[in-house]
Amino acid sequence: MNISHPNELKTDVQISVVVPIYNEEANLNYLFDRLSQNLDKMGLTYEIICVNDGSRDRSLVELIRHHQQNPAIKIINFSRNFGKEIALTAGIDYARGKAVVPIDADLQDPPELIQDMVDLWKQGYDVVYAKRRARQGETWFKQFTANNFYRIIGRMSKVPIPRDTGDFRLMDRKVVEALKKIPERNRFMKGLFAWVGFEQVAIEYDRDPRYAGTTKWNYWKLWNFALDGIASFSSLPLKVWSYLGLTISLLSLIYAVFLIVRTLISGIDVPGYASLMVAVLFLGGIQLISLGAIGEYLGRVYEEVKERPLYLVRDTYGL
Ligand code: UDP
Ligand code: MG
C-alpha cells in the first residue's frame, strides 16, 4: 500500500521564494536581477512567488512583464490590500518548493544570504532564520521601540520569539505544512514561525536600507502590530486584572476597617474629599484599562469567529 505523506509533496521545485509586494514598482527590476543571479548560481530549481497585495502603482504591470520573460516568476494578485502577513500566508500556501524563503521586495534582506541558508538546510536544519546584526537607516527611536517590543513580548510569550528577526528565513517543507495548519486570522508571522518549533538555527546579517520607495509602516501601524503580537501570544493582559483587583480589594478592606475603627473612636469627620476623589478616579482608570484589555481580545475573538477567508485572489499568473 502506498500512503503518500503530505510532507512528500510531488514537486520538482526545490526553492520557493515568496515576495509580498505593495507599491514596489521601483524595486522590481533590481529585485529580480539579484534574486535570479543568486538562485541561478546555486544550481537549484526555483520559483519566485510574488504576491501583489493590492498595489496602487504599476507593480502588477511590471510583475506581468517579468513573468512573461521568466516563467519561474509567478504572481498571485490579491483583490485588495490585505497586509504583509496575509500576503506571506498566501505565498506560502501556493509555494510548491521543498523549501520556502519569504523575502522583502525592497532588498532589505540580501538575496546573497539564501546560499548560506540552503547550506545549513542541507546540513539538516528545518528553519534557518536571518537575525539582524545592525539596523541601518533606522532612527534611534525605531531601534529603541523595537528593542523594547522584543523585550516585552519575550517576557510575555510562552514560546520564545527570536529578537531582531523578521520574516526572512528558509523553511523546510515540514515546517511549511505545519504553518498551513494554523487557521488564525490575526497572523503575527514572527510568532507563528517560532510557535511551530522544529530545528531552528540563526545566521546573522546586516540589514541594508531600503533600495527604493518608502516603508509602509508608521508608528501607529507598528503599535497595532505590536498589540497583535502580544494579544496573539500572551493572555497576560487579560489575567493580570484579577490579581490587581484582588490586591486593591484587600487594601481597601484594610482601609475600611481602619476607617470604621477611627470613626468609632473619634467620631465622624466629614472632610475627606481628596482621598475619596483619588480612590474613585484611580479605580475608574483601572477599570477602563482592564475593559480596554478585554476589548482587545474580544475584538480579535470576533475576527476569528467570523471565519472570513484570509485573503481573496483576483487572478494568478503561472500558478
Ligand atoms: N508589504 C505588503 N503589504 C503591505 C505592506 C507591505 O505586501 O500592506 C510588503 C512590502 O512590499 C515589502 C514588505 O512587505 O516587500 C516589507 O514592507 P516594508 O519594507 O514597508 O516594511 P519594513 O521593511 O519597513 O518593515
Ligand atoms: Mg523594508
Image (spheres, rainbow, N blue to C red):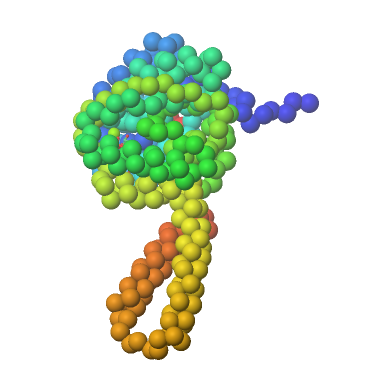
Figure disc tally: 0
The quarter holding residue 76 reads top left
Of residues 71 and 184, which is closer to you in this image?
184
- At a point 33% along the width and 25% down the height, the residue shown is 133
Of residues 10 and 143, which is closer to you in this image?
143
Q: Is residue 63 above or below residue 41?
A: below
- Left or right, 142 with respect to 185, comes to left
In the rendered image, the residue lying farthest to the right is 1
Q: Quadrant of the N terminus?
A: top right
Of residues 12 and 262, which is closer to you in this image?
262
Q: Position of residue 286 (x, y in %)?
A: 39, 66
**Quarter of the picture for ligand 2?**
top left
Residue 102 visible: yes
- At a point 51% along the width and 61% down the height, the residue shown is 243
Q: Position of residue 177 (x, y in %)?
A: 57, 33
The quarter holding residue 276 reads bottom left
Q: Is residue 103 above or below residue 221?
A: above
- At a point 39% along the width and 40% down the height, the residue shown is 151
The quarter holding residue 214 reads top left
- Left or right, 201 with respect to 23, comes to right
Residue 80 visible: no
